[in-house]
Amino acid sequence: MRRLAASIATVALAWALCWGRAGIGPDAAGDPGSAGQFLVLEGATLIDGTGDPPRRDAVVTVRGDRILSVRRSLPRGAGAAGAGPARVVDLKGRWLLPGFIDMHAHVTILPMGADGLFQSHSDRAASEQVLRTLLAMGITTVRNPAAPSGDGVALREAVAAGSIQGPRIFTAGESMNLPAARLSPPAVGVETEEQVRAEVRRQAGAGVDFVKLYASLPPPLVRAAIEEAHAHGLRVIGHLQETTWTEAARAGIDFITHGAPWAAAYLPAERRSEYRALGAAVRSRINWLEWLDPRGPEIREMIRLLKERRIPLDPTLIAYHTKFWGDDRRYLNSPDLALVPGPIRATWDRGWLGWGPREFARARAVWPKVLELVRLYYDRGVTLLAGSDVPNPWIVPGVGFHQEMELLVSAGIPPRAVLVIATANGARALGIGEEAGTIEAGKLADMVVLSADPLASISNTRSIEWVVKGGVMLRPADLMRW
């Protein structure tokens, strides 16, 4: 415990030193939400999330929780033409971006029981710590892709009401899967179309934003779930394998999650039965990648449908990288582990994959195929989203999102495009593109202030000096005091 406390203190000190370097005094933000009060962010280089080139010496004026204007120079009579008092924050030498959107963040944290399965109710304290950490890392909105319905909705509403600090939440309910799968919460077993439809109705009644379908569901149950969810105004997230992405796209699914489909149908015909015989172990994914032709006709057709039907995909590359490098000190001994709540850390077992040196070597050898797939999605026009899959093993809240952006760049996607993926694409996919995702007049004032240029190095997205959520300026160091 002393060692963990010391690590947390070290992280907090680093943030404090960051504020000292920033040259922004403790009273700079004031209370920008006050009636008649304007917040003026002056002098930063603006990367607005639209994909346009950066704009130097931008001036962004905020009133309440909204962006009032985006200009190149401060108008006379600070604020909106002198309509009220203004608090001006000098951001010269800094970069201003939209708040990040993590499209795959499990923020209802479930403790693990003695049986090795997650419990069905969340740990509220751990969930709140994760939310504050995500916000400190510049993430102002999240999609919670699976949760106990009641807990997910309650957490969403608590953030919306301001009773806890964190990113805005859009939440799914329990994942639906076949009972024969080793179900672990948040999941529910369904095996008939009637059960699928009843579960969708139950979750709709609980107030979720999305329905989540899982790997073992066959096509008839996937089709029934999509039809029932759409009848209730809910969109469907698919973490699929038994049903291929191609079949799901034709059935009208709204989102695909993770970077590879892992289905036998995408392999050469002579390998399919051999792959199925390997079972569901994570180790079999190494074989899948070894045998895959990323430019084969099945993959080409899948990508064509994802693009044509505008089905967004969050690759969660970091969730694969932490597996393929699961014995690497960069994860096992990272100083960022101090940011991981105890109930999460307790579920991370270094040997959970059961891999030895040979498996890790094989996995790393085929990693370029994972990157090739993601680059193909991007090059052929599939809408990509950024998601971390926190709190899977060795994915640190918030940090994993920034690592995801780094991995997208390593796949060959330009940094400016990755920033659009991490902001505007997420907002549009959530259906809030008119409200968030870019820095434009009339939108929510969700922004991040950086001390270093993210276009020079995407790793600079971690150089966060301020987070602005709904017009309120927040210091990361303050958010991470728990």
Image (tube, helix red, strand yellow):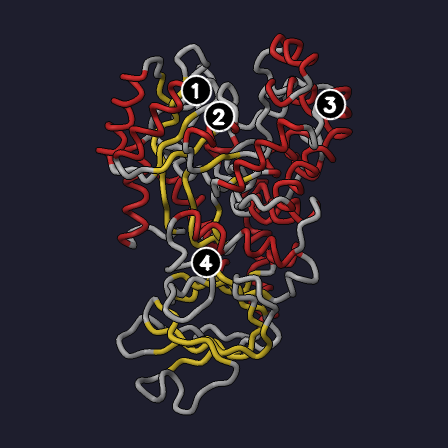
Disc 1 + disc 3, Cβ < 8 Å: no
Residue 149 image offset from top left, x and y in percent: 30, 32
Of callouts 3 and 2, the N-terminal one: 2
Q: Amino acid at mark 3?
A: Glu
Of discs 2 and 4, which sits in the foreground? 2
In the displayed structure, 31 sits above or below 403; it is below
What residue is shown at x 56% (from left), y 59% (from top)?
15
Q: Amino acid at mark 1?
A: Pro
Q: Which residue is mark 2?
A: 247
Q: Which residue is mark 3?
A: 290
383 or 455, nearer to the observer: 383
What is the distance, in whole Å, between disc 3 and disc 4 at their CAs? 37 Å
Q: Which residue is mark 1?
A: 219
Q: Which mark is residue 437?
A: 4
Of callouts 2 and 1, the N-terminal one: 1
Of callouts 1 and 4, the N-terminal one: 1
